[in-house]
Image: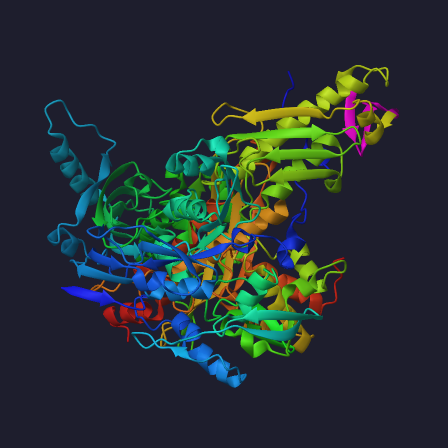
Amino acid sequence: MVEYYWPQREETTLIGKPVDRLDGLEKATGTAKYTYDVNLKDQLIAKALGCPHGHCRIKSIDTAAAEATPGVVHIELLREPGSEIEWEGELIAVVAADSEGAAVEGRSKIDVQYETLEVFTNDEDLEAAKEAGRTTRGGGKAETQREPGEEDDEDEFIEDEIKRLFGEAAHVIEGYYGIDAITHCCLEPHGSTVHWDNGRLIAYLSTQNVSGTDDGFARDLNLTADDVDVICEYIGGGFGSKFAADYWGIAAARISKQTGRPVKFMLDRDQELKLGGNRPSGYIKVKLGADENGVVQIWDSEHWGTGGANGGGVSHGVIPYVLSPPNYRRLATNIKVNAAQARAWRAPNHPQACAMSQTAYDDLAAQMGADSYDIFMRNLGSAQGAKPEVYAEEMKIAARLMDWKAKWHAHGKGPRDGSVVEGLGMALHTWGGTANNSSCQLKIYPDGSVQSFCGTQDLGTGTRTVCAQVVADTLGLSLDQVQVNIGRSTYPNSGASGGSTTVGGVSESHRRAAQDALMKLFDQVAGALEADAGDLEAVDGRIRIKGSPESSLSWKEACSRLGLKPLEVTASYQRGSGSPLSSSGVGGVQMAHVTVDTETGVVKMRKFVAVQDMGLIVNPKTAKSQIYGAAIMGIAYALFEQRKLDPATGAFVNAEMADYKLPRLGDTGQIIVELYEPDSERERGVIGLGEPPVISPGAAISNAVCNALGVRVPVLPLTPKRVLDALQQAGRV
Amino acid sequence: MTDSIHNSDTHSGVSRRAFLKGSGAAAAATAVGTSTAPLAAQEGGTEVVRGEKTISLTVNGQNRQATVEPRTTLLEMLRYQFDLTGAKPVSLDGSSGASTVWVDGKTVAASTMLALQCEGKAIRTVESLGGDQPDPVAQAFVKHDAEQCGFCTPGFVVAVRAFLDKHPNASEEEIRQGLNGNICRCGTYANIIDAAMSIVKGESHG
Ligand code: FES
């Protein structure tokens, strides 16, 4: 039995080192082939017609003119007359043609008659939603330190207890906060390029789930997973929205089968925004009570929001967020609106929960005239997720990097430069990040070359590079001596990239496979070195005896003793099986420094600090990039992006890149990232990083704006209009 | 209430695509003097110009020919005819910058230009910055990890190369102000600024 372990910090050659991503140049020079880029001989281009109404019934579909369009080869209906459509953009028919132009022209000639139905889009107005019969219970929970007695009615007891606690509180805050729905807006839209080869489906799919989507195709096409080969070498963004083949992927496969030609079917930009995934909105009414030190004792909230046409919303389970007082009551209501259903968006529930909770803590600081940093620090006793001392340490580091103490001023009391004021804000977050299931096959060839095979994918995380670092470091080789193969469902299974589980999973499987293979190689060469296999080590491209490095074989010599056949091992990690190589549960602290122009309402980012732990860090360079990216994605939803639905028609009115506002390079200010990896963290093994740093920016930036203005702008994104409205309401303009 | 949808390309019926594929194509066809009429008039007012034409141009220094329709964009020609897929289709109106290429030395969003307008022109794509001796900007993107998923990256590499050609001594502030034509969803901006600054400072990445 091989005992799996990570080498000590000072013993590694590649693990923990800032390694350039291996596919960097392919991406930078345009030769990396994404699903959209795969061009197959004689391929058809498919374009779909989207429904123009938020809610309607199809009366009739006439495709005659479309069929007669030159270049159009095939038309498939995805919806039949009589079907009810509940959101704008839903695909009704697909036109496959020789060229994009012909497909678009054909699509424009499909004549669909609709009966429009009643539309509801107002997810912020709970009363209106109730009146329209659009609400469902989203769950809730109440917890008090004092238990009800045998005789007590539980609800009454809790009601009384909450009253009592608020009566005792030295400070009471009542607030309203919210965060609008946003989309994933992957720059490579959802889609596939597919063809059939002797009854097998070859699907180039833009997916976060290479090993799992073959099943999806198979199920819907009456095949077995072995009949489907899903390939994804590069994916242009997923963020939680690309786990399935989707009905448009299945349609591509069907059309390819029927026409006998390869089919490329990618969503249009507006379809990507309308259908490709969105994140639920959340709006909350909160009352909290704190003792004289600002330590919160009681939280009472009701929140609502929408996950789309089937309801859903922000889970009550993460409210209040991270800082969780001993007494609380929380209630969630879900609203159904005419919009496509939400998909997992990077750290599902957490960014909204953070923005709906830690804003209230900051308002407590504002009311007390206290430093927000001190109030957060004093409340760490109730912190969930990471250990309070980890948050505390990270807060200290962040404050130093932000120069918090020197810059701090009470809410609304800072210096003013003309119409411009500035402010600081902070927030905390947590995430699990358990390693996903992962298997890796490793082959060492008699000529010394090494190849790994794993059905994982690289979302931009740097997965490919991490795999190579782990294998090469373990075998005592350099990166160029190892060839990593990922992105095919025919390779050993590896879990979907969701929930920050990939780097943990592939580090597990690749380290295990490399340790297993090395032990077998040691067995083969021990005789030649006149040593026990257990006394050998692989260092600097040589196999040598521990303690007497002069007795050694070069890697090549050692491998030549394998005979004719390569040495092959497959190693697996099963989620939850317990392992010294990975664990879960991280914390993070973020701070924002903003300026706000009180005349124009424009918020600008000055500086943003992110401090993050993640256990053992395999590649600090790509890890930092993920945190920079998360901070920027956070700035996006804090200040810029929102899904805007027209209340009359349900139309998603800003579903184009020009209208769906995202920050540009000049909008993000200075960003400082600090990886927190003391020995106590490193010893925990690898933990996922993708989600956590995207959680805090909303609350941190909202708090900074509030600190600048002395007025809370309640709902994210903090657009100029909302800033001005809030100032006006507060009688400040 | 009923409603009949023609030209249902987008909810408005007068989308940018309709413009490009229809009237824009007609205008361009006139501009280069093809005789591809007659126009196929269509309900709703969009007109599709028919007929293919072979054009000659240079692409990354090589003489090439392409047979294109009046409605074919430069981006479609590059991607489907030359299999040069570095320039990406992200937004039709060029607002993402992902399809940025050079036409006669000037940067253009390839999704906004018609192929017919490229007759006789010199097109340079991001692929020209690769090969055995990659352009320092592409190398700086790798060194500074200015890429995650990488879908925006080719457009950004071209934009940075073009910007630095014009402003070789740009300050960080000028870089922050001068590269706002491109969008990255993964959030690589901080590293792009570092990559660009490293070129200004003359750091080597090879
Ligand atoms: S790297 Fe993914 S969009 Fe920029």
Q: Between A377 and A694, which is closer to the camera in this rendering?
A: A694
Q: Position of residue B161 (x, y in %)?
A: 65, 69
Q: Does the rendering let one see residue A384?
A: no
Q: Say if residue A219 shows up in the picture.
A: yes
The answer to which of A103 and A634 lies nearer the viewer is A103
Q: Which residues are magenta?
A: A536-551
Task: Give yes or no for residue B142 being in the magenta stretch.
Answer: no
Q: Residue at x 71, y 38 (%)?
A: A482
Q: Residue furthest right?
A: A550
Quarter where residue B164 is shown:
bottom right
Q: Is residue A210 above or below residue A112?
A: above
**In which quadrant will I find the N terminus of chain A?**
top right
Q: Above or below — where is A224 with respect to A250?
A: above
Is B200 left, or right, of A374 in this rendering? right
- Residue placed most toward the observer, B51 or A34: B51
Q: Is residue A539 magenta?
A: yes
Left or right: residue A565 versus residue A252 is: right
